[in-house]
Amino acid sequence: MTEKDLLSLEALLSNSPHQVSLLSNAAAFLYEKLGDVCWVGFYLVDDKGDLYLGPFQGRPACVSISRGKGVCGTSLAEGRTLIVPDVSKFPGYISCDAEACSEIVIPIKDNKGNVRAVLDIDSSSTGRFSEEEPAKTEIALLEKAAEIVAFRILK
Ligand code: SME
């Protein structure tokens, strides 16, 4: 994942007004560009403030996650990126795929700062996502990718 990939993502998300189409392509793009990942997708915030499954790449996953539950629901409640190098150490982790060993969840916010969706990425390698380099630099790029997605889908 590079700065150049962010430009490609922007271009990819400029050709449709439909949220499902844009999120589907964003998930496919990130799944292809990121190495060593087993699931990339979006959970969207519903009318009650909980999460429901959106477009993704990977195995079938949980269709709904309550606000405050699991990594995704905690990221939603706290409005911040959660980096989980070892999912077995995250209290309340929701296991959708026994293969997943590390995970990152990045909130997608509207221009008022409200979380409207989360980007969830899983890896079958422990420590794939961490605060250490080179993961740290890649995570900064993923946060920029989440901003691009927000801008394109929340117009
Ligand atoms: N592990 C997530 C649930 C979603 S799946 O990883 C696709 C969580 O704890 O929120």
Image (spheres, rainbow, N blue to C red):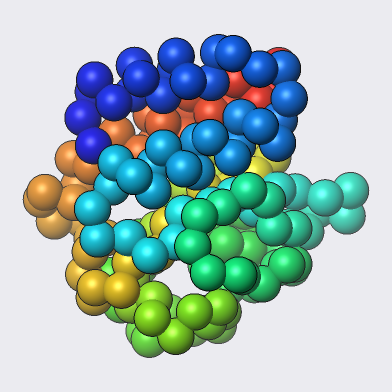
Q: In the image, what residue occupies the spot 63% across and 63% down?
A: 73
Percent position (x, y) of residue 125?
A: 24, 73
State the residue in front, 110 or 25: 25
Percent position (x, y) of residue 79?
A: 57, 47
Q: In the image, what residue occupies the spot 38% across and 29% down?
A: 144
Q: In the image, what residue occupies the spot 74% across and 67% down?
A: 64
Above or below, 31 relative to 137: below
Would residue 118 be seen by someone viewing this image from the given angle?
yes
Count every numbered label the image shows and give the total: 0
* Left or right side of 124 for 122: right
State the residue in front, 135 or 29: 29
Could you tell me which quadrant the C terminus lies in?
Answer: top right
* Left or right side of 22 for 85: left
Q: Splitting the image into 4 quarters, where does residue 99 fall?
A: bottom left
Would residue 110 be seen by someone viewing this image from the given angle?
no
Above or below, 111 relative to 58: above
Q: In the image, what residue occupies the spot 63% across and 48% down?
A: 55
Above or below, 101 relative to 21: below
Above or below, 39 relative to 14: below
Percent position (x, y) of residue 69?
A: 64, 72
Q: Residue furthest right?
A: 47
Q: Splitting the image into 4 quarters, where does residue 74 fall?
A: bottom right
* Left or right side of 141 for 112: right
* Left or right side of 69 for 130: left
Percent position (x, y) of residue 49?
A: 80, 53
Could you tell me which quadrant the N terminus lies in?
Answer: top left
